[in-house]
Image (cartoon, helix red, strand yellow):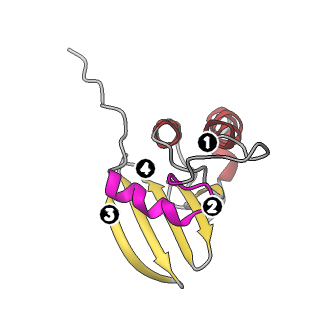
Amino acid sequence: MSYTKPPFTIPEQSLAFFTCLPLGRQAQTEAADEPTTAQAWAPFINEQLAAWTLNPGQFADDDVVPPNAATIACASATAISLRDQGAPAPTRIVPTGDGGIAFQYDSDPEFISIEVEPEGRVELLVFVNGRLTHRAEL
């Protein structure tokens, strides 16, 4: 018997943190020159994470643990789920250095990081003016 993990779902109260970002959930109407949520996520999902899947060891360094294929797959599933739930695309996606992957959002003075850990845990971190104001496991 195989177990299929349910799709990642970010809780509605956590999505509320995205309303402070330019492409937030409350922006119901998008200008003609603004990319749709799916278009904004496409480079991260179809290019960046796909390239990491082909070469997960590209970040190997003396002090950096690169994300493995399972972590990259989990990050890809997380990105697809966030996109499908209307979350804005991140400012950037980066390896955390300990084998994880972080989706980072910069919107001064807020900084939001959704981190996919190597063991599959997903954590939301919200900083305001450099101070951690909210932490939740998703």
Q: Is residue 110 above or below residue 19?
A: below
- Nearer to us of marks 4 and 1 is 1
Mark 2 and mark 4 in contact? Answer it, CB < 8 Å: no
Amino acid carrying mark 4 in the image: Pro
Q: Measured from the top left, where is residue 22 in percent x and y?
A: 63, 61
Mark 2 and mark 3 in contact? Answer it, CB < 8 Å: no
Residue assigned mark 4: 118
Residue assigned mark 2: 22
Amino acid carrying mark 1 in the image: Thr
The mark nearer the N terminus, 2 or 4, is: 2
Mark 4 and mark 1 in contact? Answer it, CB < 8 Å: no
The part of the chain drawn in magenta is 12-26
Residue assigned mark 1: 37
Give the CA separation, mark 4 to mark 1.
27 Å
The mark nearer the N terminus, 1 or 3, is: 1
- Residue drawn at x 55%, y 71% is 111
Q: Secondary structure at mark 3?
A: strand
Main SS type for the magenta part? helix
Q: Residue furthest left?
A: 1
> Callout 2: 10 Å neighbours few (<14), some, many (20+)?
few
The one of 50 and 83 positioned closer to us in this rendering: 83
> Callout 3: 10 Å neighbours few (<14), some, many (20+)?
few
Q: Is residue 16 magenta?
A: yes
Q: Is residue 109 magenta?
A: no
Q: Secondary structure at mark 4?
A: loop
- Residue drawn at x 67%, y 43% is 40
Amino acid carrying mark 2 in the image: Pro
- Residue drawn at x 62%, y 35% is 53
Give the CA separation, mark 2 to mark 1.
12 Å
Q: Measured from the top left, where is residue 49 in percent x and y?
A: 63, 40
Q: Secondary structure at mark 1?
A: helix
